[in-house]
Amino acid sequence: MSNSFTVAIIGAGPGGYVTAIRLNQYGINTVVIEKERIGGVCLNWGCIPTKTLVKNAELFHEIKNSRKFGINIDNIQLDWQKVKERKNKVRDQLIRGVEYLFKKRNIPLLKQEVKEIYYKNNEIILKCVDSENNFSIICSKYLIIATGSQPKELLNIKFDNRYIMDSKDLLDIIELPKHLTIIGGGVIGCEFAAIFNNFGCKVEIVEFMPNLIQGEDKEIVDRLAQLYKRKKIKLHLNTKVEKYEQIDAKLKLNLSNGKDIITDNVLLCVGRTPYFTIDTNPEIKLHNSAIEIDDYMETNLSNIFAIGDVTGKLMLAHNASKQGLVVADVIRNREYKMQNKLDNIIYANIPRCIFSDPEIGCVGLTEEQAKEQHHNIVIGKFPFIANGKALSLDKADGFAKLIFDKDKRTLLGACFIGPMASELVAEVAILISSKISLDKMKHIVFAHPTLSETIGEAIEDLENLAIHKIC
């Protein structure tokens, strides 16, 4: 195999592997360098394994509560090892699918780690090393850095991978804990809280800030907190862990609110930080450990791009993929001397999905952001409890919320908390990206009985015309 390529990509997560396939579709010679298994955190230890657990946990919870559906089942038991086997099976099937795509497209995938990046004779040179410490050199005209992120620790709390875990550790825990304490009430913390609560574990969340999930719509996260309390998930907001100690096979946490928690395991999930440890000459410019990029993901060094979590923009798999597709178009234009106009990514219009219970889906501006950026807004809301499909599913908690610019009659943002919120938000993302006016939205007919009717009713509620809502 030649060591010279048009494009080299470091990292085979949802940013790197998607970009490689698109470049291959464009006929551009590309190599991918990945030190671990293809798929990155998303496929291996993030999005896919956790969503598989979400399904297992929801199903277990529904079966335990099946009497309300007229189904009587006794002696329900959870086989944690079988649960993990299913998680791994789903993960492996998807990874093998991506590996097959690479094989059929003849995209080289090198299991190596890049140690150095430097320029020489107008080429980008990568010095790589494999697991046996053998070095190799890769040359390319363009470079895409897609090295992702890693979980943060606290100054006084470090991972020990046994009692204090990151999300990767928790996915493969040997036994289901009777009592799990989660430090960090962000997206990851709230998702794992729902999973292990539905599995029947006692769950507590310790969050330093006054609200769960910072940066999202306050009304939405306040409702989530209410529903979690109803589920017996104990919340310690405005609270931090002052210190901890191991007592036999448990941990004792001393909280700043004066309370103590004695728990089996701790999930530490206080955010993630961009992961980039490669020596570069000249240096790639960083800001708060993230690689700085322009509107087209190019760094301060010509022909070197960065995508995904390492850019610190939005730590979402689909954002990494979209950034990579834009870079593929940039490189295609340069290689084939094309003059296609490329649109910038509007990060606010990328859907943000939280697989809590109930789910949360958001896109565009939150109510707080809309009030700051626009003079006159109007809000339409509709509760799931008034939606026939939600009631039939026994998932009627939550509501749909649309935020409009009242003067321009354009949609600024939307938030859902309720069943299938992660799917519903995609419909609204289309409306926002298409810049459709309120008057045109009112012509859309939503099928009955579906959850999507909440969108139509929320649109009508902007003018106090929702049929099934008492104003």
Image (tube, helix red, strand yellow):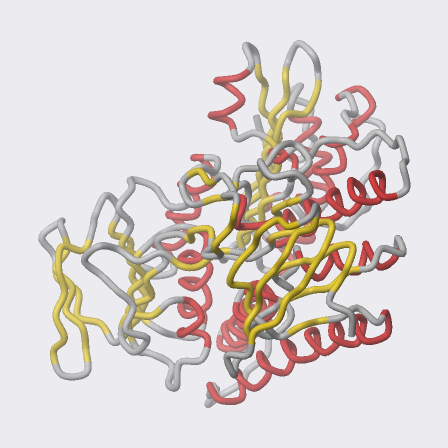
- For the question of whether residue 68 can be seen, the reply is no
**Percent of width and height locating residue 331:** 79, 44
**Percent of width and height locating residue 28:** 85, 55
- In this view, 250 is above or below 266: below
Q: In front: 240, or 12?
A: 12
For image coordinates 57% across by 16% down, the residue present is: 377
Quadrant for residue 287, please give it.
top left
Q: Quadrant of the C terminus?
A: top right
Q: In front: 421, or 391?
A: 421
- In this view, 318 is above or below 427: below
Q: In front: 370, or 346?
A: 346
**Percent of width and height locating residue 439:** 80, 19
For image coordinates 22% across by 72% down, the residue present is: 263
For image coordinates 47% across by 44% down, the residue present is: 290
Q: Quadrant of the N terminus?
A: bottom right
- In this view, 56 is above or below 342: below
- In this view, 10 is above or below 452: below
- For the question of whether residue 396 can be seen, the reply is yes
Q: Residue furthest left?
A: 258
Is 128 positioned to the left or the right of 28 in the image?
Answer: left
For image coordinates 18% across by 58% down, the residue present is: 156
**Percent of width and height locating residue 405:** 63, 17
